[in-house]
Amino acid sequence: MDHKRKIMMCLTLAAVFSPVFGKEDWKATVVKNIEALVGSCVVLPCTFTHPGTQLSNSRLRGIWHRKDNWNEIFYHEDNTKIQDSFKGRTKLLGYLGDDNCTLEIDDVKDHDNGPFCFRVELVKKDDNKPTSDKFSFVEECAEIKMLHDPRKPKFGPLKSAVEGKPYTVTCSIRHTCSSHWPEITWNRGSKDDIIEVHKDINGGIWETESILVFIPEEKDDHTDLTCTAKFHGGKSSSTAFMLNVKREATYWFLFVLKKKCCCLY
């Protein structure tokens, strides 16, 4: 075998037995700081990329662990490897085959601070054991700030209510538990009077907005309109304002009065 053929064979073998991914090719995007309501859930958005073709979900294994201790595991497909304090409380919401590593932590405890880091492994088809292609994204980890009490919902810009005319008011609450929307209720109106909208704000923060439309009556004047947000896990918070209802007759009286004044000239 001549020298040129030997070189070609070595290059071929190197291509066959080299890792599928180079270390520099592993990249992840994880929300680094996020708030969580104790007792509720928190969703940590996470995506990753790698070179080459798309891999099936069965060829990938996702693991979440503590930044300074890879053996302290918060999520693993093998439940026996998870720390006792996290068992039954974590799950992957993302589909690894679509490069989505989003994690949900349920029933948040006040010690669930993190940092939480994602690790991905390429596994063998036959025995599901990890190959040499694996990487922990320890530079992209999530830390959680605990909220023991929920934030209060907020009203949108408030307008004057007029008796007998449709009145619209909005109430919204921001949260980080996108897998379980908070439930917003009002102290008046029915479900048919309410429209609910969910918005992805950014960085794992979502907003649930409730829009109430009703016809104010005279008896509604100087009464409280209350909006209550109930969060996954059971905690709730409310906010209210006093409704001032103007009478339609008042406007007609002013209109007639102005016309009479004009006739005097």
Image: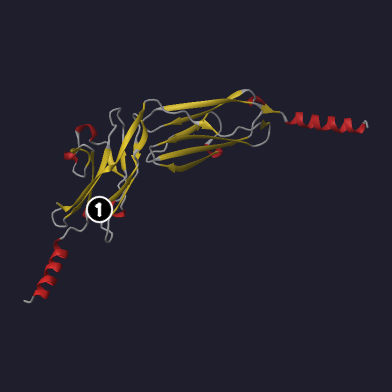
Considering every residue shown, the one lying at the far left of the view is: 1
Q: Depth check: give the residue in front, 121 or 216.
A: 121
Considering every residue shown, the one lying at the far right of the view is: 265
Q: Mark 1 points at which residue?
A: 24
- Residue 242's spot in the image, x, y percent? 60, 24
- Residue at the spot x=28%, y=51% of the render? 96
- Residue at the spot x=37%, y=41% of the render? 179
Q: Depth check: give the residue in front, 146 or 127.
A: 146
- Residue at the spot x=84%, y=29% of the render? 257
Q: In which quarter of the image is the N terminus?
A: bottom left
Q: Depth check: give the residue in front, 142 or 198.
A: 142
- Residue 41's spot in the image, x, y percent? 34, 35
Name which residue type carries label 1. Glu
Q: Depth check: give the residue in front, 40 or 102.
A: 102
Q: In which quarter of the image is the C terminus?
A: top right
- Residue at the spot x=14%, y=72% of the render? 8
- Residue 147's spot in the image, x, y percent? 37, 28
Q: Is residue 34 above or below residue 21?
A: above
